[in-house]
Amino acid sequence: MNRVDKDLYPFFIVLFLSIVALVLFWSVLDMVILAASLAVILLPLHHRLLRYTRPALSAVIITFCLMILLAGAAYVTLMILQANTGLLSDQIFGTIHLWLENPTMHPGAFGVSISKDTLNLWLDKGDALFVDYWTTIANNLLLNVFKGFVFFTAFFLLLLKGTAISDRIYQHLPQPVKRYWYQLTPVTIDTLYVIYIVQIAIAVLTFFIAIPVFYLLGYGNILFYSFLAALCEAIPILGSSVAFIIIGAYALALGDLRGVLILFILGYIVVSALPEIFIRPVLVGRRVKIHPLIMFIGIIGGILTMGIAGFVLGPLIIVLLMKSYRIWTDDRKGAKGPTEQDAARETSP
C-alpha cells in the first residue's frame, strides 16, 4: 500500500500544478478547453484521413475546415444582424430607452426590483452585442485575435499530437489510476459528443418552435426574431431567454400586455426554459446514464461559474465524478465479495 501511495506522489504534483495553471491562465485556457473538446470529437475523422495523407496535413485540413466553418457562421450572423440594425437599434432598443427615460416609469410598478440605471446598463450591453458589435469587436480586437490564435493552435496541436500525448501520460500513470483512466476515457468522449450535438439540436429546435410564438405576437419580422432566439441559444453563456427578455421589454415599453404574456408564457417558459430544464439534461443524462436533475446542475452550474468553458466542463465534471464513484463502489463490492463468501464457508457445517 505504501509503495502505491509513493507512486502516486508525482501524479498528485502534476495534478496540483495543472490546477494552478488553470487558475492563473483561465482567461485563455477556456479556448484551450474548447479546442481540446473539439479535437477529441474530430479525432475519428483525423484517423480516417491518415489512411490517405500524412498526420500533419490531415490536421491542417481539419483545422482549416473548422476555421472556414466558424468564419462562415460568424459572417452570416453578422450580415443578418446588419440587415436588421434599424429594427434592433431604432425600433426595439430605442423604444426601450425612451420608456426607461420616462420619469413616470418606475420598474417597481411592474414587480421589477432593479434600478433604472441597472436596466439601462443591461440595455447598453445588449446594444453593444447585437447592434454596435463592430465597435465591441474593435475594442477587444487584440484579445480576440490572441484567443483565436490560441484556440486554433491548440486544436491543431491536440489533433496532431493528442493521441501520442494521451498514450505517454497513460504509460506513466500508477496502476490504480490507469484503471480509472481506461474506464473514464470512453465516457468522456461520449459526453463531449452529446454536449455539442444537443447544443446544436436545441438551437435548431429553438428556431422552429419560436416561429409560432412570434407569429402570435404579431410584430412581424418572425424569421429574424426566431433567428435571434436561436442565436442566443447557440451561445452557451446567453441562452434564448435573453432574446425573449429583450423583446418582452420592448412589448412592455409599447404597453402591449398581451405581447408580454405571450413572450413570458410561450416564449420564456415553453421555448426557453423547458429545453434547458428538461430536454437538455434528459438527452445528455440518458446517454451517460445520469439523472437529469444532477445533469441540469452540472450544465447550469458550469456555465454560471466558469463561463463558456463551463459549457463543456460543468457536465463533464459531473459525469466523471459520478462514473468515478460507480467504479469505486464496484471495486469495494468486488473486494468485499470474496471475504464474505469465505466467512460463509467457514461458518457452514
Image (cartoon, rainbow, N blue to C red):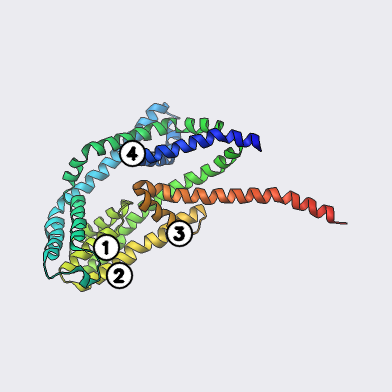
Looking at this view, is 119 or 243 the one in front?
119
Classify 10 Å Cα crowding around label 4: few (below 14), some (14-19), many (20 and above). some
Name the residue that disc number 3 marks.
282
Nearer the N terminus, badge 2 or badge 3?
A: 2
Name the residue that disc number 2 marks.
265
Looking at this view, is 96 or 212 the one in front?
96
> Residue 151 sits in which quadrant?
top left
Circles 2 and 4, Cβ within 8 Å, touching? The answer is: no
Q: Which residue is drawn at 63% across and 50% down?
A: 330
Mark 2–mark 3 distance (CA, rounded to whole Å): 22 Å
Mark 4–mark 1 distance (CA, rounded to whole Å): 37 Å
Residue 54 higher or lower than 233, as above or below: above
Please name the amino acid that badge 4 sits on: Val
Name the residue that disc number 4 marks.
28
Please name the amino acid that badge 1 sits on: Ile
Looking at this view, is 89 or 54 the one in front?
89
Which of discs 4 and 1 lies nearer the camera? The answer is: 4
Q: Is mark 2 on a helix, strand or loop?
A: helix
Which of discs 1 and 2 lies nearer the camera? The answer is: 2
